[in-house]
Amino acid sequence: MLAYLFRRILYAIPILIGVNLITFALFFMVNTPNDMARAHLGNKHVTQVAINRWKAQHGYDKPLFYNAKVNGLQKFTDTLFFQKSIKLFSFDFGVSDSGRDIGHDISQRMWPSLALAIPTLIIGILVNITFAMMMAFFRASYLDVSGVILCVTMISISALFYIIGGQYLVGKSLKLVPISGYDTGIHAWKFVILPVIIGVISGIGSGSRWYRTIFLEELHKDYVRTARAKGLSEGKVLFKHVLKNAMIPILTGIVVVLPMLFLGSLIMESFFGIPGLGSYTIDAIQQQDFAIVRSMVFLGTILYIIGLILTDVSYTLVDPRVRFA
Amino acid sequence: MVKDNLQIPLIKYLLNSLLLLSLIVGLTACGDQPVNNPHRSKDAKANVRYGVFTERPKTLDPARSYSANEAIFTGQIYEPPLQYHYLKRPYQLVPLTAETIPVPIYLDKNGHALPENAPAKEVAYSVYNIAIKSGMYYQPHPALAKDKQGQYRYLHLTQQQAGKYNTLSQFKHTGTREVTAKDYVYEIKRLASPKTQSPIAGLMSHYILGFTAYMKTLDKAFKEAKQHGKHFVNLCNYPLAGAKVIDKYHYQIVLKGKYPQFIYWLAMPFFAPIPWQADAFYSQPGLAKNNISFDWYPIGSGPYMLTVNNPNSKMVLEENPNFHGEKYPTEGMPGDKAKGLLVDAGKQLPFVKRYVFTLEKESLPMWNKFLQGYYDQSGISSDSFDQAIQVDSKGNPHLTAEMKAKHIRLLTTVEPSLFYFGFNMLDPVVGGKSERARKLRQAISIALDYEEFISIFLNGRGVAAQGPLPPGIFGHQSGKSGYNKDIYRLRNGRLERRSIREARKLLAEAGYRHGINPKTGKPLVLHYDAVVSGDPAQKAQFSWLRKQLNKLGIQLDIRTSQYNQFQQKLRLGNTQMFMFGWNADYPDPENFMFLLYGPNSKVKKGGENSTNYSNKEFDELFLQMKDLPNGPERLAVIKKMVTIVRHDAPAVWGFYPKQFVLTHEWNRISKPLSIGTNTLKYARLNPNQRAQKRNLWNKPLWWPLWALAIIIVFLIIPVLVNYWRREHKTKKHITK
């Protein structure tokens, strides 16, 4: 297993370099270092001298990929790409173009993201499984059909509608929770409760449909027929046998998203004023802060790779038939 | 057995859920505070004002900060020598930390004094001697904390020691010291520092004596320091010819030539004092790693200090215990007294103890929280405009019944800004000095109905511009005497845009009869460059623009690009027509007229003249006007300049934006001061009245929650019944 993990980590290195290269190329296709300097210095009274000084101060005065002015290996190392990328691999995210330490900001902003994402995920899974099991139990009945129609309807509604509707109904009309905002520590709960509820409700449609499909697939397997032949009740078959076996795809599906929880929810954070990592990335794109964009993409890639590795590991834990090659 | 195993836990789960729900409801229902209060309930009756910031500030360093969203903080913390009078209009400079308004001494190249009205050509230097008030102290700050031996406690931290601090409040000791002239000079030097990257460094290098050379000196000094592993360069050790300390309370600024507008810069935080100790403190590398820097932890002597600085969520300004004190103005404009603006005349400032600003990116939650009483003041977004404002048949805005019922007040003010539709004067079709091009531009100027634009897209929040100078700026002429005669006419005492027939006539005279380009025999196609915004209204605006030019038979080709590309096009002159804006740096006509001054051409000189307009007569008048004091002579020159540009029409003058602010009844009446940033000290509120209103407006409705719980139970019952039946059926079937 260790050899397998080591091999997967080695595979990750070229992926990270590739993603970094693509991010770099895409960003500088639409933004030149001059543009970045202008964006940070403002639009008034900006002189070329000021632009040059900004670029020199922030290390954007080097060529992008190839430096013809120097010799040897420096032709590649004394470039913007190399200088800006190499530190990332030691998890030194450096400072943003506006001067803030990115690592510090990430460590501060991941907690609000997690405060929102973890309860949404856990409650969402419980609700979705319960609802999907009910539909599977009463399959082909009016309850199942109504459930499926409800799910499809819920999938069809935009996430934005849930957010605005939720804020209007619960925050504005019923006045039960603050419409938006965030506070630290224990005071955070009243700000998180509404986005969590909205997150759970907006996910019921797709989640329940998916889990229902998994349960129905399991219901047609031989061991279910054997269990029924043994005289077990339908409830016992479903809750004791089907649920256990269906947990394999469910768990592996959850594990892959676990690391991504750190990255936060973009729309939710923005609408509810939660200072998480989702809004951090969007702000950076809007402010043309390449240092943050690059760091967040790098972090996202790593977390995604970790998610995939964890999925593979979790397969072996929940299904003894699966072994590492 | 099966039934017992499965149904009982299910019922238990259901009961537990309801119990938990009741508990939450019970807990939240406790106390007399509304449960939807986004602020800490202990502050419900405190003298605290709540506001928002919509964008994360980039920096609060006074040498770098140049955005309005940052000025709301820096303006309250940093104190430059001058400020704008809160009540008097047109805007008037008054001393803040200076004893008096400095009067420049003009010198010739030999250092001989010249009279006040000396022509600019003869003036080699302008000397500003500034006397500051004594007895002003900085806010408590760890950079100024000393130990028993009189040594600074925190200026020699190791990286490891510094790394332990995550916020400024974690430093156990703070200190203060008196503000001296040296600190003002230090800040001027910081403007030249490569570490600071001040946006006005380039501009100041044109004016402050020796500034360009000083920038080079500092570049070298910082490079050497870096080579020696030093993080701090004490600017006190590097003299600047144009900024000198005379004594503890006096300093001198020397400018090259004559630049009367410099006085306005002395009212901006760029020229506020900074103690060298703060620079030394923030230069320690371990602190920067934890974002403890000038950018995020200002140190000033103003009425407020920043105590909570989380630009991602919340910023809190608290009263500075070391504030030197200032009194509310005792004079204002006629009518101010009747409005209640002089009720607090002569009283000690500031009135509000604390300001809490919350980051609100979305307009809807912000608006709803304002209506709930959780924000004391609000702008009006387009989404909420109809809910807040009704415009009468004469175009005057009024509050809706809903707003009146809440006793909300509306404050409006025309901002010292201009949004114009520019022509690139270097373009062969719309640009140039020919009569053909001028008539084409005038025809377009008539056709673009900005009154309609303001009504449709701005909900009336603007005033159609008659020229480059907005209201409040010296030289702005309003009413019948100040209208643009080339575009408007007076009919029955009312100003109206010239008819489209006249525009067509001008177009025909330009050689484009019915909008047909004689060279191609097809409709004239003009190009409009715009920044793609993603705003759904933009599509409608494009369609409106096309419609306007269609009235002349001209076809409009719209080319959208990202902001960077758009700026690049402007710099290279690859545009034909575009829309652009300008917010005043200071309330002087020079700050608008220079947008049309030939040597400021964007393409040729990289200046702010985006239309690249050039007119010899206008340029000569500009040079004359910029050095004149406000008075009849200057006004006469301005009138000539305005007449020239109206006739040449390098731009359709567009509109001056109008700011609408809604304020709750518990806020004492205030007067908008668009050009000034340090106005929070004048605000006053009645926290008890606010608490009362909040409680009244935010009574929670719990019954729908119970109703929902009952509905859920009723939905679960058929499920359980069906479940039981199925299980029972199975059991019976097996028994059989």
Image (tube, coloured by chain):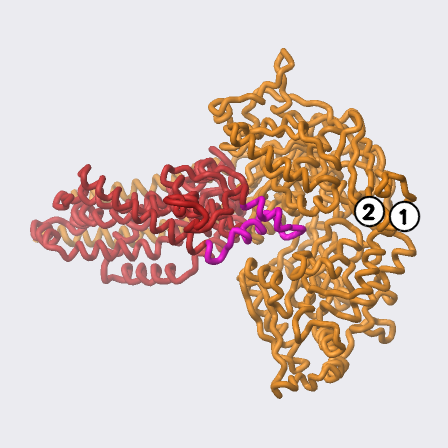
Q: Tell me whether circle 2 and circle 1 mark residues in contact (CB < 8 Å).
A: yes
Q: Quadrant of residue B559?
A: bottom right
In this rendering, would B211 be left or right of B346? left
Q: What's under tag 1, amino acid-wise?
A: Ala
Q: Quadrant of residue B316?
A: top right
Tell me what hue chain B is rendered in: orange
The image shows residue B139, relative to residue B567, as above or below, that is above
Q: Quadrant of the N terminus of chain B?
A: top left
Q: Secondary structure at mark 2?
A: loop
Q: How many marks?
A: 2
Instruction: Evaluate whether label 2 is on the same chain as label 1.
Output: yes
Q: Secondary structure at mark 1?
A: loop
Which residue in the protein does label 1 denote?
A: B118
In this rendering, would B338 be left or right of B32? right
Which residue in the protein does label 2 denote?
A: B258
Q: Residue B8: percent from the left, percent from the top?
A: 25, 41
Asked if residue A42 is among those painted magenta in the image, a careful observer would answer yes
Question: Residues under labels 2 and 1: Cα distance?
Answer: 9 Å
Q: Is residue B155 visible?
A: yes
Asked if residue B350 is among those painted magenta in the image, a careful observer would answer no
Tell me what hue chain A is rendered in: red
Categorize mark 1 by other alpha carbons within 10 Å: few (<14), some (14-19), many (20+): some
Categorize mark 2 by other alpha carbons within 10 Å: few (<14), some (14-19), many (20+): many
Q: What's under tag 2, amino acid-wise?
A: Lys
The image shows residue B442, relative to residue A148, as above or below, that is below
Instruction: Please give the range of residues in magenta.
Output: A28-55
Parent chain of label 1: B
Q: Which of pointers 2 and 1 lies earlier in the amino acid sequence?
A: 1
Q: Residue at x 84, y 56 (%)?
A: B625
Q: Quadrant of residue B438?
A: bottom right
Q: Residue B680: percent from the left, percent from the top?
A: 71, 40
The image shows residue B318, relative to residue B122, as above or below, that is above
